[in-house]
Structures are given as C-alpha cells and as structure tokens.
Amino acid sequence: MTAVTKDWRDDIYKVFKDLDITMVSHVPDAGHTPLINLCEKDNEIDVITLTTEQDGVGLSCGAYAGGRKSALLMQSSGVGNCINALALPNICRIPFLTLVSMRGEWGEFIPWQVPMGLGTPKVLEAMDVKIFRADYKEEVGSTVDAAARFAFNTNRSAAVLLSQKMIGAKQFKNG
Amino acid sequence: MIDRRPFVQKILKNRKPNLRVISGLGTSTWDIMSAGDNIGNFGFIGAMGQAIPFSLGLATSQPDLRILLFTGDGDTLMSLGSIATVANHPVTNLTIVVLDNESYVETGSQPTATAGKTDLELVSKGSGLSNSYTIRSENDYNKLIKTIYVEEGPSLVVAKCQAKATPLVFPHSFDGSVSINRFMSSIKS
C-alpha cells in the first residue's frame, strides 16, 4: 500500500504557484474547499467567489487580457452554466483552465446530480475544451500541471475532471 | 433621453492614455467603434453576459489603468449576479456604463425588463455598488467623465437612451484572437 500523506489539493496548489496562477474564481464545492482555503491564505492569489460559474469564464479571460493567469474551480453541475461563455476563450484563443469536481458518477446519492454529471464531458467536448481526467490522488498534480501547460502554451481551453471516485461520494442521511 | 451614439463618441473623443474601453455585444460595440479605431478598445460581438466579469478581471489585473465598460441593458440583465461579484471584490478603477434603451433594438425592439418594473440603478445599489446613479441627459457628461477618470470605483452608471436603431460600425476584425491580441498590445506598450 502506498502511503499518501499529502492532500492532493496541495499538489494543485503547488501547480498554481509553479505556473504563476494568481487568480482563482469559484462557485464552491466541498471537493475544492481545502484548495480554496489554501488559496485564500496566500496573499499572492486573488480568490473570487462567483454567483454563477459562467462569470468565471469572462473573469478569467479579462484577467488574462490584463496579463494574469487564473483558474476556475467548479462542480460538474456548473459546467452546464458555462456553455455559451466558453465561446469567449475559444474565439479569442485565450488560455482557459478549469478544475471540475465530478458529481453524479461514482456512488452518487442524489439523483439530481446525475444528468449534468453524465453531460459534463459531452458539453465540454462540444465546446472544444480539452479534457484531462484524474481518477487517483497520485495523478492529480501531474494532470493539473499538464492541463495548465496545455492551456497556457497552446492558447486553448482545458478542463481537469476530478473524479468522484477520488473525492468520495457523500452519503446523505435524512433527519 | 440620451442619443447614445454621439454621447459615446463625445466621451471617447479626447480619451486619456490610461483609459481602456470594453463594450458588451451588439450596439455598444458599434457605438465605441464609431468613435474611431483605437487599439485600447475591445468589443464583444458574442458571449452575451460576459462583458461585466471580463471587465472585472481586466480591472483587477491592471490597477493603474481606468477601465470603462459600455454595455446594454440586455447584456447587463443577463449577468445581474456579476454586479454582486464586482461589489464584493471591489476594484477602484472600473466604471460600467449601461446604455439603457429599455429594448432589444437589434432583434426588433422587444422591450427588456427595464421597460417594465426593473431599475438597474437600484439593482446595482442593492448588489452593493454604492456609486450607482442614473443619467438622462447629455448635460451629465462632466459628472460621468469624473466618475470614469477620478472617482473611486467600482461605479455603475445607467444612461437612459433613446431606443432607436443606429448604423452598424464594424471593428477592425471579427476574429476575436486578432482583437484581443491587438488590445493586449495596448497594455504591454
């Protein structure tokens, strides 16, 4: 058995620091919370809470136009909110990076999460977003690093799907 | 009611070097382009609702520039939540001017919510943008210029405009990558 002492969110944070990502926007998800907390403690990273995920697309593009790299954190249900907004980085060839915590796939409890969970990769592909997927904690750092380099080096949109198998499916209790 | 085209042209006529201008899709883009080609302009022609968050991202990245967004009531109504985001991550250098003609003029002049009961100044104030006000006449030009260049933002100004169709004035390119790279060169230089 491999001993994993570090949280995989630390590995994502390290990529942000290595690649000089200084703005992180999000509609929060429990899977991202340790990463959001790390970023909020860092004075060099601007953390912006959105009211809808699509605003993170425009925000990220505006930040890039001003010379700054950013990442959008969201849950898979938020991907559907971004569809038309994704035209902006696409047509402008602005690098766009998003990290998506998946719901509705591995041991999901809430049926309402399933439609967008199933739709997430299809929607991203439909909008020409390159998908990277991390199913195991050990591969998160290298996957986010690869996706970020893909986005910023080739001026394309990239999404990392962080699997529910890795994050863990919350089981809800009534009462 | 303001005649938007000459009003926008007047605002942009003697623009200062520290001003960068963004426009929301449609008529606002034709408006700023009608004032003359300038590499310090970036106009949306699609991605409705993204102009406010884009301008926020730009303003936070370039605190030494003054960022002016011209957009319409239709574009603003599509992203009301972004006004709350602007208010809660305040940037001092951003002015949003909503050219509010209370209609979707380009698609056949269907009324927007602002033709009915919705007041964008109140929405903005309620979202937390204390410096929000409405102008209804070209006589408020000096007040607006002060907001754009001097006052501590973020600010949102609702400019009530006549709902009339204006000629389309195309940007330098319809290719977004050309437009954004040209705009970014105005920031690097």
Image (spheres, helix red, strand yellow):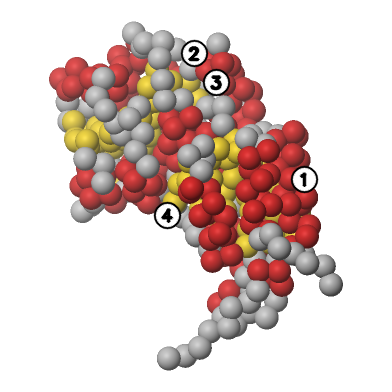
**SS at mark 3 in the image:** helix
Q: Is residue B139 above or below residue B124?
A: above
Are callouts 2 and 1 both on one chain?
no
Dot in front, 1 or 4: 1
In the image, is residue A78 above or below residue A130? Answer: below
Q: Which mark is residue B115?
A: none
Please give the residue where the numbered disc 1 appears in the rendered image: A146
Please state if B130 lies on the left or on the right of A21 as rendered: left
Using a 10 Å C-alpha cutoff, classify the residue at mark 4 as few (fewer than 14 neighbours), some (14 to 19) or many (20 or more): some
Q: Nearer the viewer, mark 3 or mark 1?
A: 1
Task: Determine the chain carrying the residue at label 1.
Answer: A
Residue B137: percent from left, percent from top: 17, 26
CA distance for labels 1 and 4: 28 Å
Q: For the residues marked 3 and 4, what is the alpha-carbon distance in whole angstroms?
A: 28 Å
Contact between labelled residues 4 and 1, with CB atoms less than 8 Å apart: no
Residue B183: mark in rendering: 3
Q: What subunit carries mark 3?
A: B
Q: Farthest residue in the top direction?
A: B14
Give the CA separation, mark 3 to mark 1.
28 Å
Q: Tell me which amino acid carries mark 1.
A: Ala
Name the residue type under label 2: Asp
Split into 4 quadrants, where in the image is the N terminus of chain A?
bottom right
Mark positioned earlier in the residue sequence (1 or 4) = 4
Q: Quadrant of residue B59?
A: top left
